[in-house]
Amino acid sequence: MSTYSAPIRLDLLTRLDGGREETDRLFGILQPSVLYERPIAERHRIVFYVGHLEAFDWNLLRGYLELDRFHPEFDRLFAFGIDPVDGNLPSDQPSDWPSLTEVSRYRRRIRQELDAALADADESEELVQLMNIAIEHRLMHAETLEYLFHQLPFESKIAPVTYELAGLVGVVPQMIEVPAGSVTLGLRRDCGQFGWDNEFEAHIADVPGFSIDKHKVSNGQFAEFVRAGGYALREFWAKADWTWRTEAGITHPAFWMPASEGFHYRGMFEELDLPLDAPVYVSHAEACAYARWAQKDLPTEAEWVRAAEGAGVPKETRRFWDATAISSAPSVFGVEDLFGSAWEWTSSTFAPYPGFEPHPHYPGYSANFFDGQHFVMKGGSVRTAGCMLRPSFRNWFQGHYPYVYAGFRCVSH
């Protein structure tokens, strides 16, 4: 009846436990007093995520495991995150949320019931699919928590006794020629590999020749754009992007902090010197403005995948709390640092591949965001779990969201 063996199942249970340990550890770096804060206006208060991770697993697995609901109100309250576009911000207050004691009791019971049921469950292809969804969803949210926490005041967090700051090696800006060719986007449904619904179906795209930055645009390079008045020059910004920038009063990347001599970097636990050789973290709007200023473009999704052909993919990158460049094997064309230092914005709006089918257990995962307001990101950041560092993985965010560990590189045609 099953096409999967017991060792794979044990591995999935181990990975689920590891994901729980990771997210528990992340909540542990916060002072308890900030759990009802909202560090980013477009996201829920932190307490939502305390309940959401378990509620998601419960809502996903409960039916398959034939478990009875015990708190339907919390099942609904903690079911879904939010992604408001340009101004439609949440207005709830801390008093609108249940106490941490109630949420913690809910979480503990979910883990107890799921673990007991999973220990007795029969193996099936459907269960393996559900487990992979639960695991990768949790690991995605681990990265969400990290960039949320990055925006909290330093005194709100408890730094580890020791933590390593990344060492950086200077890079010289250089463009790499990528010849015309075809590229496979996505996964085949019969490949035997887990993928989210937007990764299917595999298809071939022809890509004309282009040149692309060997490395991501660095903080040092982006500082030239800032010094040149790039945030004040209307001609480098699309109309909607300019409106967003001016109304929000944005004059520099969200991870930069004005200092007497220029800018410092907002580290997770302390203010640092701006790491000039690390990839800059910016919104899609800011990346586009820089590209226009440099008389270049952002790559399409197909161009990025073409440039990444044959690149080494690190097995794990959760090494550093703050920006760094990752040393990994370059692509066959010599393009470097493609996986693991920062997500990379593309010019492609997030849209379904030909043959797209919503996942029956999570139909809104991708389809709810095929709205022309979100853009594809590729690669992965220093806080992205290794299982998602795959060429087919597609991340996406709206263009006016500056808080993700997302950078970019430019292309010329």
Image (cartoon, rainbow, N blue to C red):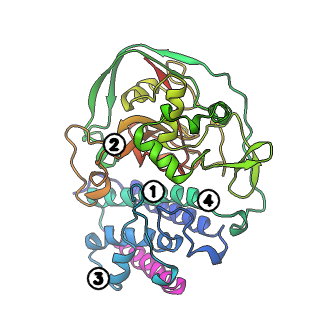
Residues at circles 3 and 4 in contact by the CB criterion of under 8 Å: no
The quarter of the picture where residue 166 lies is: top right
- Judged by depth in the image, the label closer to the viewer, 2 or 1, is 2
- Magenta span: predominant SS is helix
Q: State left or right for residue 201 relative to residue 43.
A: left
Residue 409 in the image: x percent, y percent?
52, 30
- Judged by depth in the image, the label closer to the viewer, 4 or 1, is 4
Boundaries of the magenta span: 98-121
Residue bearing mark 1: 11
Residue farthest along the right direction in this orientation = 260
Query: Which of marks 4 and 2 precedes in the sequence?
Result: 4
Residue bearing mark 4: 151
Q: What is the crowding at mark 1: few (fewer than 14 residues within 10 Å), some, or many (at least 20)?
A: few
Residue bearing mark 3: 68
Q: Is residue 103 covered in magenta?
A: yes
Residue 273 in the image: x percent, y percent?
77, 44
Residue at 48% across / 34% down in the picture? 288
Residue at 52% across / 39% down in the picture? 286
Q: Relative to residue 33, is residue 403 depicted above or below?
A: above
SS for dot 4 = loop
Residue bearing mark 2: 350
